[in-house]
Amino acid sequence: MRHDYASRPAHIRWLLDSDPAIRWQVMRDLTDAPPDAIAAERARVATEGWGAELLARQSQRGHWPGGQWDLVTLWSLVVLKDLGLDSASKQARKMIDRVDKRLVFKPLNNRPYLSGETEPCINGRILGIGAYFKEPNDALARQLLREQLKDGGWNCQAPQSTRSSFHTTICVLEGLLQHERAGRKSPAITRARKRAENYLLSRRMFRSLSTGDIIDKRWLRFTYPTHWHYDVLRGLDYLRNAGVKPDDRIHEAMQMVIARRHQNGRWPLNLLHPEYIPLQMETAVAGASRWNTLRALRVLRWYTNSTYRL
């Protein structure tokens, strides 16, 4: 199936001339294509390109090979979710049934994989995966709410640490949002998300609350997959997805995103994290990145289309 993209700007044509996982999200988020066309393009994720390749590399036992099985599996499942693999497709159902029926955490008395383990940075992602591909896990959501720290976020080093981590907080926020969208919206979860969103916003998405210094300059460099790592683009894309109204607390972060844009309208791949999944998508550091360009453009659209004005 081919499309006539001649009337599109060059960087949009470049995005559309891509993997189905990128193409359907461009159609939804940037070109406002008809719903039927978006759905048809999204359906291709299960049978073509990156989605089909990653699905094919799942073992019969349910995990993905190549390292510590539980983490490689976690990152692979997150990528399949981010690709937009339709959870109702037969390929997705087969995949998640293997995970649900065959994978357990043996040191935790054979706890089922989708029931989570002990660290909130992992459990936030598992919560989102389960809600997206299988069913919402209310017990895991309640566990995460109990673990929220006084400053509004989460930290895998708690209770030894009483200060939240941007990394852990974004992982939990994404999971709670997906849990709510799977039909489990509740005042308690909404309050928890709003507190955590304020944790990010009060720090301008990357600055220390006490000193105003940049917490980690790597957060101003963008990549995909993000794995457990926070960066400014990931944080902003969460806020966009959650429907948070932009205000002056994200202005500086947005300027950082805009500054990364090249003259050809594309954003580069600034770095790659060391975590592994058995799929290569974009690997040319400093080269143009369709993932970063897609996410940056939709964040920019959310920002500029809001009623907020500088």
Image (spheres, grey):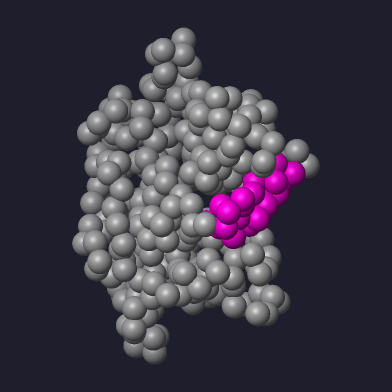
Magenta span includes 199:
yes
Query: Residue drawn 31% across and 48% down?
Result: 273
> Can you give x and y, in whole percent of width and height, for residue 185 in the image?
71, 43
Q: Give the range drawn in magenta.
A: 190-212
Query: Residue drawn 70% across and 49% down?
Result: 194
Would you say residue 296 is visible in this rendering? yes
95 shown above or below 280? above
> Can you give x and y, in whole percent of width and height, for residue 108 in the image?
46, 13
Query: Residue drawn 36% across and 32% down?
Result: 71
303 shown above or below 203? below
Query: Residue drawn 53% across and 41% down?
Result: 165
Q: Residue furthest right?
A: 187
24 shown above or below 301? above
In the picture provided, is 198 more to the left or to the right than 8? right
Quarter of the rendering containing residue 269: bottom left
Magenta span includes 219:
no
Please tell me which residue lies in front, 111 or 218. Answer: 218
In the picture provided, is 27 more to the left or to the right than 76? right
In the picture provided, is 183 more to the left or to the right than 64? right
Which quadrant is the C terminus positioned in?
Answer: bottom right
Would you say residue 197 is visible in this rendering? no
> Can you give x and y, in whole percent of width and height, for residue 162 in the image?
61, 32
> Can you give x and y, in whole percent of width and height, for residue 119 in the image?
50, 28
